[in-house]
Amino acid sequence: MLSENIKAIRKSKGLSQQELAVKLNVVRQTISKWEQGLSVPDSDLLISLSEALETPVSTLLGETVVEEEADAIKAISEKLEIINLQLAQRKTLRRKILHWLFILACVIIAAVSAFLIVVNSPYLGWDYGDPELAVAGVIFHAFEWLFVRLAPIILIAALVGIFMTRKKA
């Protein structure tokens, strides 16, 4: 009875003997012996088995479990197919959003670069005797210094991201 129940419930959960063995930290042969009725799990393993199979211990030890009918399995597979389709659509949407964010990053870097080229470091001609201009000059210079060093790295990463997230035929 226990051996038949273990096998039926394992199959109904879609687990192989190996997968169940990994969950219980035992070898596959142990599961095989339980299902053939050659041995039985001790009390600790029986509790772990019930948790792994998401089934009460009483069900494992009780009456023979009948495997699910084909209609129930078909309904489950149809639901899983719908879920897989929804997950695929989400993945595609995320990829598109990420792709456009990488493109936006490239455009922003190009625009800021063009701005800095046109402005040609205006803070060099400012009167630093005025405290407000001194602070603004230091902030602008720090931004320009960071941008010149980080923009190429970010641009390369964004271009690689655009390449990696492009639509594949």
Image: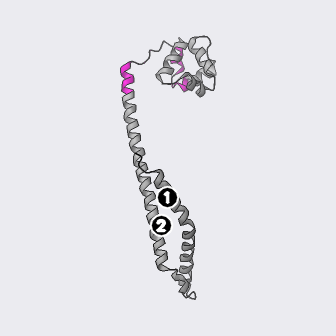
Residue 60: percent from left, percent from top: 53, 17
Q: Residue at x 46, y 74 (%)?
A: 115
Taking depth in this image into account, of 122 and 52 the one nearest to the observer is: 122
Depicted 152 relative to depicted 58: above or below: below
Check disc 2 and give the amino acid type.
Ile
Q: Residues within 10 Å of mark 1 (few under 14, many from 20)?
A: many
Q: Residue at x 38, y 43 (%)?
A: 89
Check disc 1 and give the amino acid type.
Ala
Quarter placement of the C terminus: top left
- Picture disc at residue 140: none
For numbered disc 2, what is the local secondary structure? helix
Question: In the rendered view, does 71 fall on the left or right side of 122?
Answer: left
Reply yes or no: does residue 62 show up in magenta: yes
Residue 72: percent from left, percent from top: 37, 22
- Picture disc at residue 158: 1
How is the protein colored in the picture?
one colour
> Does the residue at mark 2 contact the one at mark 1 (Cβ under 8 Å)?
yes
Q: Residue at x 43, y 49 (%)?
A: 95
Tell me where the magenta segment starts and ends, as one range: 50-76
For disc 2, the marked residue is 109
For numbered disc 1, what is the local secondary structure? helix
Q: Which sits earlier in the primary sequence, circle 2 or circle 1?
A: 2
Question: In the rendered view, does 139 fall on the left or right side of 163?
Answer: right
Q: Quadrant of residue 34?
A: top right
Question: In the rendered view, does 1 fall on the left or right side of 38?
Answer: left
Q: Quadrant of residue 78?
A: top left
